[in-house]
Every structure is written in C-alpha cells, then in structure tokens.
C-alpha cells in the first residue's frame, strides 16, 4: 500500500489489498499484455499507429490506476482518463461512421463523468470530507447519490438501458481496441459499482431486486437485438450487453446473499473478459481462417466456453450463478424457480446468438478468402499464436477458479442441464435455416436512434453554419486611376502643385 494522504487529499492511496482488486488487476494486466502484443503486429503498417499507441497507453494507465485506487478521487481520475482516452481508439480509422460513433461515445462518456462526479461530491460530503473507501462504506447511501452513481457507472458498464454507445463503438474500432473495450474497459463501471456501492448497505438491499430484474432484461435484450444484425462485431457488442446483464444480476445478488456471490462475480468477470476478447480478435482477422481448421477451432473453443460447455469456465460460472440465485433472500414477488428457468432460456439464446455469429463469420471468410487477403495475411502467424495463447488460458481458467475462489465443480446432473440448452439451440438454428424463415428486411441492420439524437445534441452546441451575405464593397481606387488617366499629367508634380496652391490659399485667408 502507498499512502499519499500527506501529499494529496485525505485518504489518498494506491494498493492491491482487497480480496478482489488483486486478481482483477492481474487479470487486466494479462489481457492488456496479450492484446498489446497483438497490436504490435496488427498496427505495424498502420500510418496512424503513433496515435493508436498514444491512446492505448493512456487507457492502460487509467485502467491500472482505477483498479489500484484506495480512494474515490484516484478512482475518478483513472476512470476519466480511461473513458476519455478510449475515444481516440474508437475514431482511429477516421471514417465518417467512426466519427459518428465516437461523437456518441464521447457525449455519453462526458455525461457519465458528470453524473459520477456529482455522486462523488455527495458521498464525500456525507463522509465528512474523507475520500477513502473505508470511510465511505461506513456512511449509509442516499437515494440521490445512489442514483447518480448507478447512472454514471452504468453508462460505462453498458448494460440495458445504458448501452447505446456499445453497438456503435465496437464495429468501428480496431479489433484489439474492441477486445479491450469489451474485455476490460466496460468492467471498470462494474468495479466502480463494487467500490462505491457496498452490498451490505440497507438502501442497496432494497434496490437489489430492481437491479436483478434489470440485469435479466439486459441479458435477454442483448441476445434478441444481436440476432437482427449480420456484422460480426455488432453481434459481439450486443453479446456484451447481454453478458453485462448477467454481471449486473450477480452484483444485485451480493446484497441478497450476504456477499457470498462475490467469488462467482469475480470468476464471471475473468471468464467473460478472456472469452469475449478472443472472439473480437478472431473477428478482426476474418478471411484469414479460410481453409485452416485449427484457426476456426480457436473460435469454437472460445464460443463453446461462452455457451457454458461442460468443463469450461462458462459452465463453472453459470452453475455458480444458479446456485447463488437459489440461495438468495428474494422478495415475495420474485420466484427463484422462475428465475432459474429464465437463466436456462438465456443460455439457449446465448448459444443461438453465437451460432448466428459463426454463420456470419463463415460468410465473411468466404467473401475474403482470395489471394490478396491470403498474401496480406502471410505474416499473421504471430497474431494467431497470441490468440491461441489467450484461448488456451481461457480453458485453463476453470482449474484456477476452483483453486483461487473455491467454486465447486458442476455435478453430473448440472452438466446435463448445461448440455441440453446447447442441443436445443442447434435444433432451433437448423429449423430456422431448413424452412428459410426470415423477418422483414427493414428489421435487420437498423441504424440506432441514439445516433439521431446524438446529432441533434451536437447541433445544439455546434450549430450548422449559415450562409453569410456578402455586401458589395466600395473602393475609390478605380476612380482615382481613371482621373489620373484623364488628366494625363505627371502625378507627382501635379500633386505638389496642388499642395502649394492650397497652402497659399490658406496663408491668404489666415
């Protein structure tokens, strides 16, 4: 622990002493290093590589700072640095679509910063001017500060209904940036909720059922919305909205289980970060996997972990989620059996979405499997090796989770409960293509209304320039030239003569 209270503000400090900040920091560092190595290879010939690395390093510094922060101000500084620097990664390509997505992202990021800052001031006032976490957690929450903090941090976390920027920013950012956005950066909002909003607070226990239902809505909404798009990175973005719903559900369960759900929450964060980063990196190399079975196998290993295949990290965390839900102290209007069935239905929809993603990636592979793409991908062995290392770590993760957080392996009955949702999703996918069922065309790949409102907001603070009227200018220079030509006299002597005459008249009249 580094105590900075004598140098900065009261309670300032950095350290990794909490039971969940240390593994969170190590996991984030591992992901940043792997994706950073991937970026070294993928951005090697990019003319804008210098700008990419500038914002990459700033995001890395902000992320590491907010995890190690022992007080709210240090967290806020890291959170702001991460949020605002990520704008440079979103608009990296410089296209019109990237600028539109970047504008929406920046507007919501600034809004989130303002809401978070207001909530921070209220909490600091209630804590008597102290900013360390221990002082804050000893002070009861107030409805206004709780609302501000949930909205400010939720805009970064990206769960429904605060997800608007997520499906716009992921498709336009470079693949490694998208992997970090989904794998690490959106988790900053969740970490802030863990630090700012203690689960044992009385008000949090009252609000927890509402957050639980919101998480379920986000889980279903993200999958159903993703099925209406054909761009792989947009599908993955909506998958992140869905998975953040499950994490919000686990966050709500912290208040309903007496913090017993914390190990499952941490395991889910690591599992989702590694799996989703792997899928985004694979989506960024579409076309290079054509004809290479082992490369496509990397996608299926990451996707099957997301589908909670037995012996995967997904199976471990999904089983733990159901176990914690069954043990939760739910209010009377929430039925644990119904919620468990909804989680099973969510597993079916998640598998269906990933099968839909596989179909779109296969179509992208077929379109781009030409000699030009293969030639450009001739030096991509390093990137595939890093992706293989990430996927391998994902499948080693269950043993680490069991050892680190003492989660129990699923029983045989629980394994059976994990397999049949996958089989049902395969059957539904086959029936959908067998009978060629399609929704109306205008339902697919629709532009988000958020972009329209983003443009309207932009025109409020940056009005469209109006055409200016150009009034005729009056100058005497042409008239002077005409007079000189008409007189046909030497200009200098004639001017001197006129001046002398005027001077003489002046003397006579004096």
Image (spheres, grey):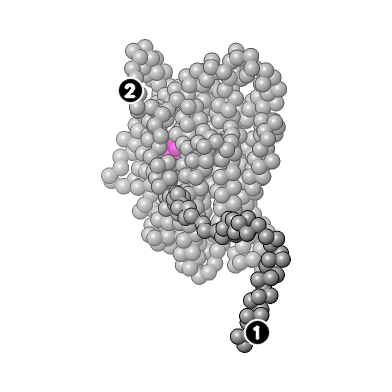
Residue 104 placement, left or right of 403? left
Residue lying at 64% horizontally and 66% vertically, measured from the top left = 8
Residue located beneath label 2 in the image: 439
Is 277 or 216 nearer to us in this picture? 277
Q: Position of residue 14 (x, y in %)?
A: 64, 56
The magenta segment: 241-245
Residue 15 placement, left or right of 208? right
Q: Is residue 203 visible?
A: yes
Residue lying at 46% horizontally and 60% vertically, measured from the top left = 119
Q: Quadrant of the C terminus?
A: bottom right
Of badges 1 and 2, the one in the foreground is 1
* Disc on the earlier residue, 1 or 2: 2
For the stretch drawn in magenta, the main secondary structure is helix
Residue lying at 56% horizontally and 45% vertically, measured from the top left = 87
Q: Position of residue 204 (x, y in %)?
A: 40, 54
Is 326 or 150 nearer to us in this picture? 150
Q: Is residue 477 visible?
A: no
In the rendered image, residue 20 lying in the magenta stretch gets the answer no
Residue located beneath label 1 in the image: 507
Residue lying at 43% horizontally and 45% vertically, measured from the top left = 455
Whether tag 1 and tag 2 are in contact, CB under 8 A, the answer is no
Helix, strand or loop status at disc 2: loop
Classed neighbour count for the residue bearing mark 2: other residues with Cα under 10 Å, few (<14), some (14–19), many (≥20): few
């Amino acid at each position: 622990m580094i105590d900075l209270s004598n140098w900065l503000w009261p309670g300032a400090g950095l350290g990794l002493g909490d039971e969940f900040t240390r593994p969170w920091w190590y996991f984030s560092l591992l992901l940043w290093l792997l994706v950073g190595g991937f970026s070294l290879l993928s951005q090697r010939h990019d003319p804008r590589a210098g700008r990419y690395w500038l914002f990459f390093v700033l995001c890395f510094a902000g992320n590491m700072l907010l995890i190690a922060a022992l007080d709210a101000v240090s967290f806020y500084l890291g959170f702001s640095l991460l949020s605002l620097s990520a704008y440079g990664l979103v608009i990296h390509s410089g296209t019109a679509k990237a600028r539109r997505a970047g504008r929406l992202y920046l507007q919501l990021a600034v809004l989130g910063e303002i809401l978070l800052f207001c909530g921070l001031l209220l909490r600091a006032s209630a804590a008597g001017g102290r900013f360390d976490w221990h002082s804050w957690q000893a002070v009861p929450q107030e409805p206004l500060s709780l609302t501000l903090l949930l909205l400010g941090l939720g805009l970064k976390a990206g769960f429904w209904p605060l997800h608007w920027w997520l499906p716009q920013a992921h498709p336009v950012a470079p693949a490694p940036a998208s992997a970090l956005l989904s794998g690490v950066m959106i988790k900053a909002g969740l970490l802030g909720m863990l630090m700012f909003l203690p689960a044992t607070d009385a008000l949090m226990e009252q609000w927890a059922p509402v957050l639980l239902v919101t998480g379920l809505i986000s889980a279903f909404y993200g999958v159903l919305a993703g099925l209406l798009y054909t761009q792989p990175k947009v599908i993955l973005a909506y998958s992140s909205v869905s998975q953040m719903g499950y994490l919000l559900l686990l966050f709500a369960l912290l208040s309903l289980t007496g913090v017993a759900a914390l190990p499952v929450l941490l395991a889910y964060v690591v599992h989702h970060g590694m799996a989703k980063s792997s899928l985004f990196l694979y989506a960024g190399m579409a076309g290079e996997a054509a004809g290479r079975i082992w490369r496509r196998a990397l996608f299926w290993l990451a996707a099957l972990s997301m589908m909670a295949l037995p012996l995967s990290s997904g199976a471990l965390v999904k089983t733990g989620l159901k176990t914690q839900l069954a043990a939760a102290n739910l209010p009377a209007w929430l039925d644990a059996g119904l919620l468990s069935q909804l989680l099973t239905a969510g597993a079916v929809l998640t598998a269906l979405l990933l099968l839909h993603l596989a179909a779109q990636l296969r179509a992208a592979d077929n379109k781009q499997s030409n000699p030009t793409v293969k030639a450009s991908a001739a030096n991509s062995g390093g990137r595939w090796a890093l992706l293989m290392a990430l996927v391998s770590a994902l499948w080693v993760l269950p043993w680490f989770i069991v050892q680190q957080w003492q989660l129990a392996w699923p029983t045989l009955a629980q394994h059976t409960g994990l397999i049949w949702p996958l089989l049902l999703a395969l059957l539904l996918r086959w029936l959908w293509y067998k009978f060629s069922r399609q929704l109306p065309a205008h339902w697919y790949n629709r532009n988000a209304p958020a972009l329209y409102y983003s443009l309207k907001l932009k025109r409020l603070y940056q009005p469209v320039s109006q055409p200016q009227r150009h009034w005729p200018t009056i100058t005497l220079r042409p008239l002077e030239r005409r007079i000189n030509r008409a007189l046909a006299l030497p200009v200098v002597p004639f001017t001197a003569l006129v001046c002398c005459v005027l001077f003489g008249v002046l003397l006579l009249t004096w």
